[in-house]
Amino acid sequence: METESAENNLYFTFGVIADLQYANVQNGLNYARTRERYYRNSLLQLRRAIKEWNEELITPKFILQLGDIIDGCNSQIKVPEEALQTVINEFTNCASPVHHIWGNHEFYNFDRKQLAKSVLNSKHLEGDVEPGDVPCFETEVNPDDPEAFYGYHFSPFPKFRFIITDGYDLSILGREKNSEKHNKSVQILKSNNKNENPNSPEGLDGLNKRFLGFNGGFSQEQLEWLNNVLTFSDNNQEKVTVIGHLPVHPYSTDPMCVAWNYNEILSLLHAHPSVICFIAGHDHDGGYYLDDHGIHHLTFEGVIETSPESQAFGTVHVYEDRMILKGRGRISARGLWYRNR
């Protein structure tokens, strides 16, 4: 019998999961106190996801873990390393390599130096199926550089590229207090949000609600690096998916979850015909929008607010002309057709 790959010209698949926020504590409520959070159950949800990925007819080439792997409360109860190791122990059972994104909850538990030295730095997975064809565009995630950002790219299949971006490159979280980027981030936040609590949206209207302490943005340095990689992909006729914790299109998420300078990175993405999709987490309700330039903005629902009776992960099947998201539970199935080049 022919395989699914032979029948449907399937190139490869990859898995996606977002916002586990595991903690060994009782269930709680979200920031707005409108939704239950299932802290311990996140581990069981991940275990089920890994089991299903491992049992799929075609093993996923890789898994995208979209950030907020453990909850910030682990820092308050002084067990961040233990909580992280508990989740990583589950991931060791996964047959596919895992690419980790850094979200706000990573920075509630660890600073950038710690993350750069941890298992959550997956930059060692950077690489191409055809070595030597790609310029370096090197970004060293140097734990001793207070201004470094976390970003890299890889090609798991000819003419397809995935780029990991750092939505907290500009942030009041994680950076040394005297660093240039930290000072700039404080200035951005204070000039747009006058509340004593930087996480409060009180008095903020519309998209101004994005100027919150648990969000962040992209530095000019990172945008220039991204532009260089995308220019190569344009010239090489590649199809590119960009990944980050924060959504970058306001129609794909709640205004409170959008990156600070979403307009800058969005303009950059629109300038490159190679870009077909932006995948994000952060907004536990998820979202989707196909923008005017044909880029699919896919925001994944968070595991942390998924009841034990449901699920929240997906597998993306990649073809020559489209990607098909096969979601489980709260994740809707979608067809993502590539824009005309």
Image: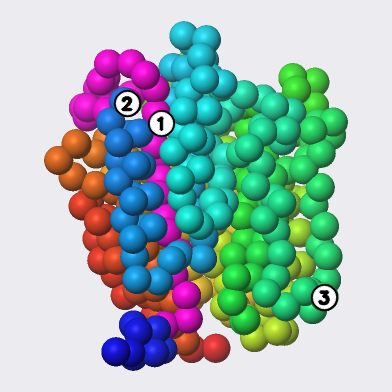
SS at mark 1?
loop
Viewer-side residue, 156 vs 136: 156
Viewer-side residue, 36 vs 1: 1
Residue 118 is tagged as none
Disc 1 vs disc 3: Cβ atoms closer than 8 Å? no
- Residue located 14% across and 40% down the image: 309
Q: Alpha-carbon distance for marks 2 and 1?
A: 7 Å
Q: Label 1: how many residues lie within 10 Å, few (<14), some (14-19) or many (20+)? A: many
- Is residue 20 shown in magenta? yes
* Residue holding disc 1: 21
- Residue 130 in sight in this render: yes
- Is residue 206 shown in magenta? no
Stretch of the chain drawn in magenta: 10-39
Disc 2 vs disc 1: Cβ atoms closer than 8 Å? yes
* Residue holding disc 3: 132
Residue 39 is tagged as 2
Hey, what amino acid is under mark 2? Tyr
Q: Alpha-carbon distance for marks 1 and 3?
A: 38 Å
- Residue located 39% across and 22% down the image: 23
- Picture quadrant of residue 158: bottom right
Q: Of all residues shown, which one is farthest toward the left? A: 309
Q: Label 2: how many residues lie within 10 Å, few (<14), some (14-19) or many (20+)? A: many
Viewer-side residue, 69 vs 228: 69
SS at mark 3?
loop
The quarter of the rendered structure image containing the C terminus is bottom right
